[in-house]
């Protein structure tokens, strides 16, 4: 669909995806989770407790936060741990299908919902050797992967008790972005078909105890301020209806829920490490010449676009602040600059995506990971 500019008819919302409560192994109630989300300024949350679709907690607006309920499903009897799947937008519990990952994906799709492979690659250490990676890579039909699992991204640093304590106290110092192996796997998968990337916190708000001292590791509020998935929509949320009429209220929630799901489904989203700095306003789009001097936006992140015959396609990136912007083609950096914006003319059909890196706490850290623009030739249609 033709657009005129990167900000026209675009609305941006961000939220935490992949969250646990006392309905599974999280330590907080829905109310505590919402407290954290409100303090973190989130627009939405996606609660995904293990193998349960929490129905006693209705989806809807809670103190201004759109609260959506999905589930994280895995086979509890599986010998080799792993194959956790985020099922977003499901109306009925699909955990009965957990034994066969392909059947599970099919069951999610039958509900017009979205399946994401959670923490698909995990790094264990001697101290924390249990890992839960995705194991059955032959499956098809899933919407995408959790490119950056915040909780999982600390694991590799817990190589000694001292380091584990440091990670528990200062987790933000010990994460640098998605695991390089996950990025590489994602780039490989996208050579076959679009695979949407999202970022999840996997917040459990675990209570760590040592004698009389106890501390919550990665609270809901800390996670809300840290790693979010930012979604672009064409129309705005209807928001919290004040009317007493509950039908009307449900209608609003359904509408806004569909916008979030659709933004994820289409990959109109990016992973933002907002703790390094707010990532609102990031844009990645493709445009073509439209007459004398005008440019016309023809695609945004997540879209597939055809190379125009006889002219080139210009990719444009705008970062919220000056930072290290990298444009990648099939996983390799082809252009970069320390800037607010970069552009690049493409003539080859490929998968183009953007990473933005920023210095914080003494190190260069992954800040923004966009979904790609898939460029194809006219004859590929
Ligand atoms: Zn998991
Ligand atoms: Zn989880």
Image: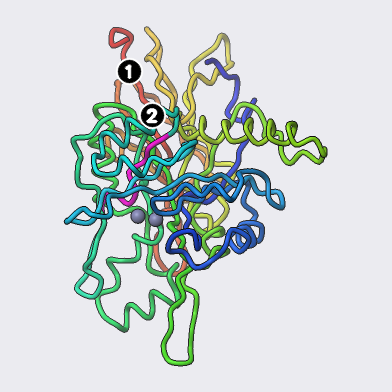
Asked whether, in this view, residue 204 is left or right of residue 181, the answer is right
- Residue in view at x 23 percent, y 65 percent: 130
Q: What is the span of residues highlighted in magenta in the rendered image?
A: 114-122
Q: Ligand 1 appears in which quadrant?
A: bottom left
Q: What label does residue 109 carry, if any? A: 2
- Residue in view at x 42 percent, y 52 percent: 357
Residue 100 or 121: which is nearer the viewer?
100
Residue receiving disc 1: 376
Could you tell me residue 279's position as x and y percent? Answer: 55, 48
- Residue in view at x 61 percent, y 57 percent: 37
Numbered marks: total: 2
**Residue 99 falls in image quadrant:** top left
Could you tell me residue 352's position as x and y percent? Answer: 35, 31
* Image height of 308 relative to 370, above or below: above
Q: Is residue 337 among the parts visible in the rendering?
A: no
At label 2, counting other C-alpha atoms closer than 10 Å, the crowd grade (few under 14, some 14-19, many 20 or more) is some
**Residue 347 falls in image quadrant:** top left
Q: Is residue 114 among the parts visible in the rendering?
A: yes
């Amino acid at each position: 669909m033709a657009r005129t500019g990167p900000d026209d008819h675009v609305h941006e919302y961000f939220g935490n995806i992949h969250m646990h409560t006392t309905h599974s192994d999280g330590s907080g109630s829905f109310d505590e989770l919402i407290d954290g989300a409100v303090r973190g300024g989130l627009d939405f949350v996606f609660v995904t407790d293990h193998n349960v679709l929490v129905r006693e907690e209705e989806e809807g607006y809670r103190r201004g936060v759109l609260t959506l309920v999905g589930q994280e499903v895995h086979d509890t009897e599986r010998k080799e741990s792993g194959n956790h799947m985020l099922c977003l937008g499901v109306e009925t519990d699909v955990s009965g299908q957990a034994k066969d990952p392909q059947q599970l994906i099919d069951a999610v799709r039958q509900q017009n919902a979205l399946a994401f492979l959670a923490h698909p690659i995990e790094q264990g250490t001697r101290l924390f050797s249990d890992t839960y990676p995705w194991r059955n890579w032959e499956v098809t039909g899933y919407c995408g992967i959790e490119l950056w699992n915040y909780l999982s991204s600390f694991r590799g640093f817990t190589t000694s008790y001292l380091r584990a304590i440091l990670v528990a106290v200062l987790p933000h110092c010990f994460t640098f972005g998605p695991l390089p192996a996950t990025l590489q796997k994602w780039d490989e998968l996208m050579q076959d078909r679009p695979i949407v990337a999202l970022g999840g916190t996997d917040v459990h708000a675990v209570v760590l105890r040592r004698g009389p001292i106890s501390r919550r590791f990665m609270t809901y509020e800390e996670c809300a301020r840290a790693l979010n998935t930012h979604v672009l929509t064409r129309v705005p949320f209807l928001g919290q209806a004040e009317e007493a009429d509950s039908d009307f209220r449900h209608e609003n929630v359904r509408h806004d829920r569909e916008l979030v799901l659709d933004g994820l489904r289409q990959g109109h989203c990016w992973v933002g490490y907002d703790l390094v700095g707010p990532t609102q306003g990031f844009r990645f789009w493709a445009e073509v010449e439209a007459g004398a001097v005008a440019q016309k936006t023809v695609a945004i992140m997540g879209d597939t676009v055809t190379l125009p015959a006889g002219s080139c396609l210009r990719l444009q990136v705008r970062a919220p602040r000056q930072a290290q912007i990298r444009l990648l083609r099939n996983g390799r950096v082809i252009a970069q600059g320390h800037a607010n914006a970069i552009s690049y003319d493409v003539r080859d059909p490929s998968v183009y995506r953007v990473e933005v890196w920023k210095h914080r706490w003494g190190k260069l850290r992954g800040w923004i990971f966009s979904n790609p623009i898939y460029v194809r030739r006219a004859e590929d249609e």
